[in-house]
Amino acid sequence: MARNGEIQVDFARRRELESVLGAGHVGYCYQCGACVGDCPTARFHGTFNPRTIMLQALLGDLDDLLQPESVIWLCSNCYNCYERCPQDVRPVEVIIALKNLCVKQGHISGEIVEVSKRVRETGRSVPVMPSINRMRQDLGLPPLEELDVSDLKKILPQQEEESGS
């Protein structure tokens, strides 16, 4: 955030994020850009940049990040940024914390809700289409069976109560 050419830091918002993270790693980021170098999402989505997300987190400028259509939902959680960061800032964990704040505040897109519902019901984030099993058959692989989601259903209701979803 800039006002009159000065950079303003919203420390209250930054502390809010750090309370979800459980540690003050955000402040160690010195914007070297190592997190971007091996990021598969940044390579294919011009709007996604872990360095920019970290800058916004550093400044406490979270309003754009805590929206249902925020770029944070594009993160694939590959942990490449975690491995590359020389300061052990753990950008992926910052992004996960931002996602958790979004959910806590009720700022979650319909697509994410649908994927979550599908995982609860089938154990898979993507439905198994007949064409997938045909391709598997062509490759000599067995068809994908339905998954046993009984253990998943034991865990997820508890998670839903805690998150309020």
Image (cartoon, helix red, strand yellow):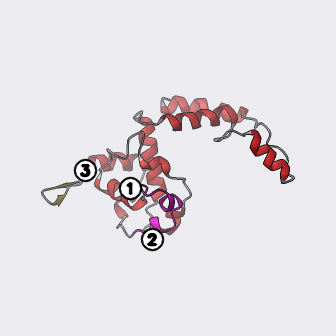
Q: Which amino acid type is marked by label 2?
A: Pro
Asked if the residue at tag 3 contacts the one at tag 1, i.e. Cβ–Cβ closer than 8 Å, the answer is no
Q: Is residue 54 left or right of residue 121?
A: left
| Quarter of the figure with residue 23 | bottom left
Question: How far from the left and from the top, in percent, is residue 130?
Answer: 76, 39
Q: Which residue is mark 1?
A: 53
Residue range of the region highlighted in magenta in the rendering: 33-48
The residue that appears at 64% across and 37% down in the rendered structure is 119
Q: Tell me which label, 1 or 2, sits earlier in the chain.
A: 1
Q: Tell me which label, 1 or 3, sits earlier in the chain.
A: 3
Q: Which amino acid type is marked by label 3?
A: Asp
Estimate how packed mark 3 is, as few (under 14), some (14 to 19) or many (20 or more) residues with alpha carbons within 10 Å: some
Residue toward you, 33 or 48: 48
Q: Does residue 111 show up magenta in the picture?
A: no
The residue that appears at 52% across and 38% down in the rendered structure is 112
Q: Which residue is mark 3?
A: 10
Q: Which residue is mark 2?
A: 86
